[in-house]
Amino acid sequence: MGAWFRCPGGRSYHREMAEGDLWTTADIARRLAISTERARRLCQRADFPRPVESAPFFDLWRASDVEAWLVEGRLDG
């Protein structure tokens, strides 16, 4: 599996997901092709993976945890 990333200037590129990749809510929104607000609501669900790091204005999730959650089909739940 890989992830899409946006470079400055708006150009997107795809790369394989690395073992320790951490995603913000915006990264999750890009991965799911949804708005950041919708991603925030998803991240608050009880069945969504817990963040591995938290800061005053953002949380970070392990990309592999989010991908596993998606594979389990929880997005539609």
Image (cartoon, grey):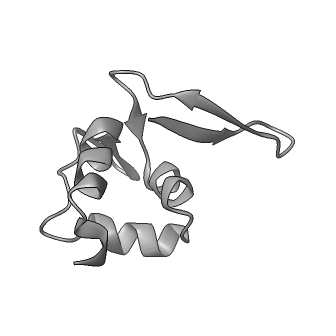
Q: Vertically, is 15 above or below 26?
A: above
Q: Residue furthest right?
A: 9
Of residues 8 and 66, which is closer to you in this image?
A: 66
Q: Residue furthest top?
A: 19
Of residues 37 and 63, which is closer to you in this image?
A: 63
Q: Vertically, is 17 above or below 50?
A: above
Picture mark count: 0
State left or right for residue 11 relative to residue 2.
right
User: In the rendered image, which quarter contains the N terminus?
Assistant: top left
Residue 2 spot, x, y in % from top left: 50, 35
User: In the rendered image, which quarter contains the C terminus?
Assistant: bottom left
State left or right for residue 2 relative to residue 13.
left
Name the residue rendered at 39%, 68% in the picture. Answer: 40
Q: Residue furthest left?
A: 46
Q: Vertically, is 1 above or below 70?
A: above
**Quadrant of residue 39 within the rendered picture:** bottom left
Residue 33 spot, x, y in % from top left: 56, 64
